[in-house]
Amino acid sequence: MTECFSEPSLAEVLADPLVQVVMASDGVDPAELQASLTAIAGNIRRHPPIRLKPVGARENLCPRSRVKGDRLRSTAAKLL
């Protein structure tokens, strides 16, 4: 690994003796796996996934509902 606490590169993972034993027992060809993962990474770089903003509060779903709720609360406060 090149940095402290960084993820290992694909080459480093594929060179790991334990990974090689597991791949051999599963019938995985390291060269095919590396080619597949490299192609997938290239596709992700060319077409990054769409990042949606998380919706936390109800106001984010429908801004008008907050206004309507405020009106209801103020009307209820007047009645009480």
Image: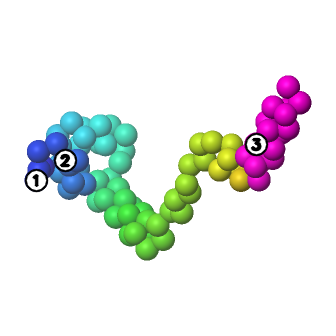
* Residue 19 occupies quadrant: top left
Give the crowd class for mark 3: few <14, some 14-19, many >=20 residues within 10 Å: few
Q: Give residue 5's position: percent from left, percent from top.
A: 16, 42
Residue 45 visible in the picture: yes
The residue lying at 11 percent from left, 45 percent from top is 4
Helix, strand or loop at mark 1? loop
The residue that label 2 is drawn on is: 6
As measured in the structure, the alpha-carbon distance from the residue carrying label 1 to the one carrying label 2 is 7 Å
Can you name the residue that lies furthest to the bottom here? 46
Q: Give residue 41's position: percent from left, percent from top.
A: 38, 64
* Residue 31 occupies quadrant: bottom left
Give the crowd class for mark 1: few <14, some 14-19, many >=20 residues within 10 Å: few
The residue that label 3 is drawn on is: 70
Q: Amino acid at mark 1?
A: Thr
Residue in front for this viewpoint, 57 or 18: 57
Provide the residue span drawn in magenta.
64-80
Residue in front for this viewpoint, 7 or 32: 7
The residue that label 1 is drawn on is: 2
Residue in front for this viewpoint, 47 or 55: 55
Q: Give residue 61's position: percent from left, percent from top.
A: 70, 50
Q: Amino acid at mark 3?
A: Asp
Give the crowd class for mark 2: few <14, some 14-19, many >=20 residues within 10 Å: few
Please report whichever mark, 3 or 1, sits nearer to the chain's N-terminal start. Answer: 1
Which label belongs to residue 43? none
Q: Relative to 2, does residue 18 appear above or below in the rendering?
A: above
Q: Relative to 20, does residue 49 appear above or below in the rendering?
A: below
